[in-house]
Image: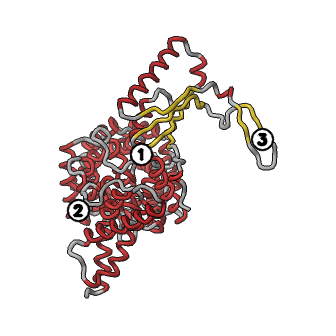
């Protein structure tokens, strides 16, 4: 098994104009997604929805200078990062199949790097 | 003792025929492409050294055994050094599984890899080309080829791209990627840029790959159709270039110069494939079949050709298919050339065709037949500007001159 981070990029404007019903519908879709993951024999290890990108702050740690704090996300995109999942799946094929079921317009699938002692480069 | 020349000849042949089989068997053992490649390479080096004492009865089997043993030794050593649990995915017992090379093909052509990486990896891992050869074949710098291959291998390992044959429901889409890559390798060789019109190193590799895929997936019509298509294209190769190196269009080719053996092989495959399915390669092979079985260009069954392109437009509506369809339409006896021209003009707005010389060349031909010479000349000039192939450029220039 391997772990993958699903980064969900969507139009924030759509979320801004959401009715109560639409919001509940969206949450229901995430519930269905969770069920599909479980049914596939994979697991959701974590995941959250994020506040708007306009609420983000970015800290830039600079060599030989004070850290710089700026208002806004690190990368400004038309469709913004709005949530994430960490999924344990068999391999990339299964992860991609699950991403196709994920209720979001754009899902970046990134393998999680193993950081245990065993995974360190050989001395 | 066996003569050194004989040994080299056998090793070269086995390298060409069985590289992917040996490598794929080691990959199944190690799941580590770099390690598997190193050990396969080493096994071939050992063959050169030890085969002068006698060439084994089953050279590919010998190489597989040696390469897997080398890989196991290296894994054990690394395991001891790093006090890790064995990485082995399976017991080393079963050295040969007939599906190994196919698994490797699907790994190289995984949709999560960029098309250019798929092509480079396929040439490297399935055809057994060195990085330098891959670079030469794709007309890119060696460093670029090396970077592409390294990056792709890293992604396969880090992202967990599996080493398996896709399940039935995934197979059509996944197979299409594989066939597209092979077709791309062939096309790159067939319409080579620069001085030569064809690069037989590439076209030959692509046909070998298509043969391998047909053998590995006998139940699927599309690999068979692709091979048929390539064989029929290949059969016309000699007649495509005149004795003084000029491009000869299909319309003007001396059909007696076509390679009858390759044609027969190709037509038989196209016919069977079309009976078994209507995938895009079956339809393309059908078009090629209609061309090669016609007694002359004029007597080609253009209506039927248009029908094949109509079918292609349903499942595969690309601007290039649309252009080929219009070009075929222009050749149906008594075609309404004004209507054809209107369709060509509509395609002129397609960004995908903006740099494609065949569009203005087709327009130029239709305009010539309508006797609209100044516009035809203008279209030929545009086609000349767009083509990257010297021979094609000379051909278009000759057409342009004949207008004046």
Q: Which mark is residue B262?
A: 2
Task: Tell me: B216 left or right of B75.
Answer: left
Both labels 2 and 1 in a single chain: yes
Query: To which quarter of the image does residue A15 belong?
Result: top right
Q: Residues within 10 Å of mark 1 (few under 14, many from 20)?
A: some
Label disc, if present, on residue B256 of the rendered structure: none
Q: Is residue B244 depicted above or below B152 in this figure? A: below
Residue B138 or B249: which is nearer the viewer? B138
Chain of the residue on which disc 1 is drawn: B
Q: Residue A67, labelled with which disc?
A: 3
- Image coords of residue B218 (percent x, y): 21, 51
Report helix, strand or loop for mark 3.
loop
* The N terminus of chain B, quarter of image: bottom left
Chain under disc 3: A
Residues at discs 2 and 1 in contact (Cβ within 8 Å) = no
- Dots 3 and 2: beta carbons under 8 Å? no
Lateral position of residue A48 relative to residue B100, left or right: right
**Residue B300: where, in percent of width, then height?**
25, 50
């Amino acid at each position: 098994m391997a772990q993958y981070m699903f980064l969900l990029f969507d139009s924030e404007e759509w979320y801004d104009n959401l009715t109560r019903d639409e919001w509940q519908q969206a949450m229901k879709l995430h519930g269905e997604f969770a069920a599909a993951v479980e049914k596939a024999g994979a697991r959701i290890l974590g995941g959250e929805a994020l506040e708007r990108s306009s609420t983000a702050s970015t800290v830039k740690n600079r060599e030989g200078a004070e850290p710089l704090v700026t208002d806004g996300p690190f990368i400004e995109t038309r469709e913004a990062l709005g949530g994430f999942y960490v999924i344990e799946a068999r391999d990339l094929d299964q992860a991609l199949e699950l991403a196709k079921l994920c209720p979001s317009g754009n899902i970046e699938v990134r393998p999680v790097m193993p950081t245990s002692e065993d995974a360190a480069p050989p001395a | 003792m066996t003569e050194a020349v004989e040994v080299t000849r056998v090793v070269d042949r086995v390298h060409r025929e069985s590289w992917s089989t040996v490598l794929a068997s080691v990959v199944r053992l190690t799941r580590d492409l770099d390690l598997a490649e190193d050990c396969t390479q080493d096994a071939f080096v050992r063959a050169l050294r030890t085969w002068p004492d006698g060439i084994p009865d089953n050279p590919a089997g010998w190489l597989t055994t040696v390469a897997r043993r080398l890989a196991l030794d290296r894994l054990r050593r690394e395991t001891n050094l790093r006090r890790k649990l064995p990485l082995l995915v399976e017991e080393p017992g079963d050295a040969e599984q007939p599906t190994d090379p196919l698994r490797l093909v699907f790994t190289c052509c995984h949709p999560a890899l960029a098309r250019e990486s798929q092509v480079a990896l396929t040439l490297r891992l399935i055809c057994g080309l060195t990085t330098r050869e891959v670079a030469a074949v794709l007309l890119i710098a060696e460093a670029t080829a090396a970077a592409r291959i390294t990056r792709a291998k890293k992604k396969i390992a880090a992202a967990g791209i599996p080493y398996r044959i896709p399940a039935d429901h995934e197979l059509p889409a996944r197979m299409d990627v594989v066939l597209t890559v092979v077709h791309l390798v062939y096309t790159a060789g067939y319409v080579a840029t620069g001085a030569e019109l064809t690069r037989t190193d590439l076209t030959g590799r692509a046909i070998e790959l298509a043969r391998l895929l047909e053998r590995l997936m006998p139940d699927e019509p599309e690999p068979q159709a692709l091979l048929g298509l390539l064989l029929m294209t290949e059969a016309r190769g000699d007649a495509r270039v005149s004795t003084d190196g000029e491009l000869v269009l299909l319309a003007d080719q001396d059909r007696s110069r076509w390679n009858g053996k390759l044609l027969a092989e190709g037509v038989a495959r196209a016919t069977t494939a079309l009976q078994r399915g209507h995938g895009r390669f079956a339809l393309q092979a059908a078009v090629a079949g209609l061309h090669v079985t016609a007694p002359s260009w004029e007597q080609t069954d253009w209506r039927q050709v248009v029908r094949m392109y109509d079918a292609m437009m349903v499942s595969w509506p690309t601007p290039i298919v649309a252009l080929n369809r219009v070009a075929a339409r222009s050749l149906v006896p008594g075609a309404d050339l004004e209507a054809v021209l209107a369709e060509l003009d509509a395609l002129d707005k397609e960004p995908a065709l903006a740099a494609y010389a065949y569009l203005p060349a087709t327009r130029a031909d239709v305009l010539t037949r309508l006797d609209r010479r100044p516009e035809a000349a203008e279209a030929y000039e545009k086609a000349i500007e767009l083509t990257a192939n010297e021979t094609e450029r000379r051909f278009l220039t000759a057409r342009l001159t004949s207008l004046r």
